[in-house]
Amino acid sequence: MATPRPSGSGKRPTITEVARRAGVSTGTVSRHLNGGHWVSPDSAKAIARAIRETGYVANSTARRLRTGRSGTVAFVIDEPPASFFEDPTFESLVIEVGQALAARDQSMVLLLAGDEDSAKRAENFLLTSGVDGAVTASAQPQHHLFERIQAAGIPLVNVGSPAGLEDRVAFVAADDREGARMMARHLLERGARRLAVIAGPAHTPGGSLRPEAFADAVRDAGRTGGAGGTGAADGPEGADGSVAEGAAARIVTVRHGDYSERSGEDCAAEILAEHPDVEAIFAANDRMARGAIAALRAAGRAVPEDVLVGGFDDSAGAVAEDPPLTTVRQDFRRIAVELVDALGKQIDGGVRANVVVPVQLVVRDSTSPARP
Amino acid sequence: MATPRPSGSGKRPTITEVARRAGVSTGTVSRHLNGGHWVSPDSAKAIARAIRETGYVANSTARRLRTGRSGTVAFVIDEPPASFFEDPTFESLVIEVGQALAARDQSMVLLLAGDEDSAKRAENFLLTSGVDGAVTASAQPQHHLFERIQAAGIPLVNVGSPAGLEDRVAFVAADDREGARMMARHLLERGARRLAVIAGPAHTPGGSLRPEAFADAVRDAGRTGGAGGTGAADGPEGADGSVAEGAAARIVTVRHGDYSERSGEDCAAEILAEHPDVEAIFAANDRMARGAIAALRAAGRAVPEDVLVGGFDDSAGAVAEDPPLTTVRQDFRRIAVELVDALGKQIDGGVRANVVVPVQLVVRDSTSPARP
C-alpha cells in the first residue's frame, strides 16, 4: 500500500478537512467512520477518497482521541488452526461473541495464536491496531498471552477461569465447579461407586476446576454416608443393577487428555485396563466423552448398561450421536453477552469484574440405563 | 482503555523516546515491534510500558511511515459464521493462508462479514486499523466488499475469480475451467451421455466458470463425434454397461445449489424427478456431490453403478465417506502461497497480478463402476 500522504507537512489531518474535501458534513464523516449508517454510497466513496488523500485513514490516534474507540475487539484464541476448527465449542463462542459485539455495532477480528511466534504477532497487532480490547480463550501459559496483552495496556476478558490467575485476569466462565458437582451427584444417584475422570489439560478449567469439584462431591457423598445422596430413590444399586454392598463411592483414577476425541479414547482404554470394574466415567468435555464411549464399546462394554459416561459442554456435534450424551450445558450465548459487557465496562471505566454463568445438567441416554 | 497520553503536547513520540524510557536500544524496540525476536521478556515488558506511557502505541502512523508496514493482513470472508464453520474449504484456506503469512512473519486477522452491517464494520476496521492488505473470499455482490476495500485504498487479492470483476479485482484461483473440463472428459469416458450439473451460486466460480466449462467440454465432445473422446478404451457404453447407441452426450439440466449438502440433495432429487435417465451428475463442490449421492440412494439408485457422481475441491470431510468421491483437487497450499505473494507485490509496488493454480482430477469409486 502506498504510504498515505499527510496533506500539510507536520499537520495532522482533521475530520473537518476530510468532510470539506468530500463535500459532506463532519457528521456524515463521523457516521461513516462509525459503521456507515445513513451514509449514501456516493458520500461513502467521496469520504473514503478524502480519507485516503489526507492520510486521515492511517492516523487512528486522531479518531481514538476523538471517540475513544476503534469499535473493534480482538478475539484471540491460543490454539493452532486445526484444533480451532476441530472443537465445536470454538464455533459456538465465535458465533455468539460476534453476535454480542454486533449488537453493539462493534466488530470482531479473530486471531489464532497457538504457538510462541503467533502469540508475539498477535501482541504486535494489538499494540499497533488500536483495538479497544481483547477476548481471550485457551491461553497456554508458555505463550504468555495474558502478560503480553496486559503489558500492552489492552483491556482483556478471558473465556473461562484463567488457571491460577483469577485475581489478575478478568474472566467470564461457566460455573465449572457446580457443573462437575451436579454430574457427580447424578452418577452417584444412578448407582455408580467406582468412578474415573478424564480431565483436560492442567491449565484449563477442565483440567483443574471440573475434576477437583467432581472429586470433592464424590468424597462428600462418601462422608455423609449413602453415596447416592440422602434418600435417593435409586438406592445403592450399581449401574448394572447389582447391589454395591453399601460401598463408599470413590474416584479410582484421574487421567489427563487434551480434549480431543482420540485422547478420550486412549484415556478410557487405560482406565479399563487398570480398573476393569469402573462403573462411571466423567470426561471434562463432550469430545473426550465420545472417545471414551468408543473405547468402552471396543472393549465390549455397553453404555450405559455396563458403564455410565458423562461429558461437559453440550456441544452441537458431540451430543447428537449414539447414545445421546448426558452432559453439563454451557450457555455460550449468555457467556458471550457477559463477556462483551464485562469488556465494555473495562474499556469504559477500567472496571474489572468476573462473571460466573450458571450451568445445567442435561440427562440423556449415556447415563440412563433401562431399569426393571 | 485509557486514552494514551502523548508525552509532550503536540509532539509525536519517537522510537528513540520509547527506547530511552525503556532503557534499551532503538534496535531492540524495533525488533520488539517487528515480532519480538531476540528481545528478552524483561525488555519486552519495559518497552510495552514505555510505548503505553508515550502514546507511541496508538500512533500507528509513525510506525507505518517508518516501516511502511503493520505486518498484518486481514482475511475477510463474506460468510455468516455458521456457513464459515460448515464448509471445510474455509478451514483449509484459513490454515494455509495463516501459514503462508506466518512464513513471512506476518499476522492474519480474520473477519467474517456475511451481511451488510458486518461488511460495513469490516470496512471501518480496515480503514482505521492500518492493516497492510486484505485477502477476500466468498464476496457477495450485494455487500460491496470489493468496492469498500478498494475505496479505502487497501491492497486486495481475492480467493477465486471475482465473477465479472476479473479486470478490477486481483485474484488467485484454481483453474476452475480446466478442472471442469477434466471432469467432463472423465465422465464421458466412463460412458455417461446424459449429464446433469449442480452449480453453485451465480456470483461464485462454481456457479459460472465450472458449469460453463463443463457444458462446453460436453458440447465439444458431441461435435467431434465419439463423445467418450477419441479412441477411449471404454467406448460408448453407458455407466450401467448398456450401449448408449452412439447418442451424442448432452447436459440435461443445470440446477443451482448453495454449496450445502442439503442443497445438493434437493437439486439431485429434482434432477431425478425430471430426468430419471440421468447417467452422471457433476456437482460444483464436494458437499453438494455428497448430498446428491444421498438423494440418489434414497431413490434407489446406486453410485456409481446407476449414476456417476463427481465433485470439486477434494475437501477433507467430504471425500472420506462412502463411496469415496471422484473430484477436482484444489491445491489450497499453493493457492495460499500465491495469494500472499500477490498481495505482497501489490503492497510493495502496487503491482496487480492474477494467478491461476493448476488442478488435478482425483478418480475414486463414485465414478468407477466395477466393470465386467
Image (tube, coloured by chain):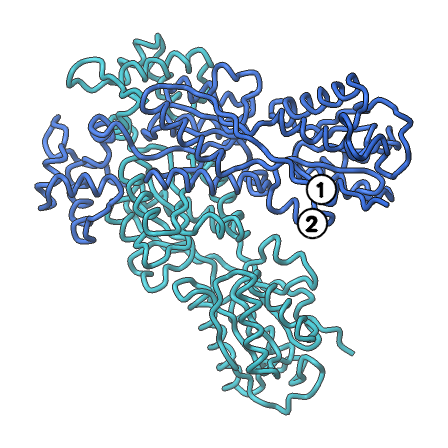
Chain colours: A cyan, B blue
Badge 2 element = loop
Q: Amino acid at mark 2?
A: Glu
| Quarter containing the C terminus of chain B | top right
Residue B19 percent location from the top left of the image: 11, 41
Q: Amino acid at mark 1?
A: Arg
| Quarter containing the N terminus of chain B | top left
Judging by the rendered image, the residue that carries numbered circle 1 is B290
**CB atoms at circles 1 and 2 under 8 Å apart?**
yes
Judge from the rendering whether residue B231 lies leftward or rightward of residue B354; answer left or right: right
Residue B267 seen in the figure: no
Work out whether residue A16 or residue B270 is closer to the camera in this orientation and state it: B270
Work out whether residue A282 or residue B84 is closer to the camera in this orientation and state it: B84
The picture quadrant where one finds residue B232 is: top right
* Mark found first going from the N terminus, 1 or 2: 1
Judge from the rendering whether residue B321 lies leftward or rightward of residue A193; answer left or right: right
Work out whether residue B371 or residue A184 is closer to the camera in this orientation and state it: B371
Which numbered marker is on residue B321?
2
Residue B278 percent location from the top left of the image: 84, 31
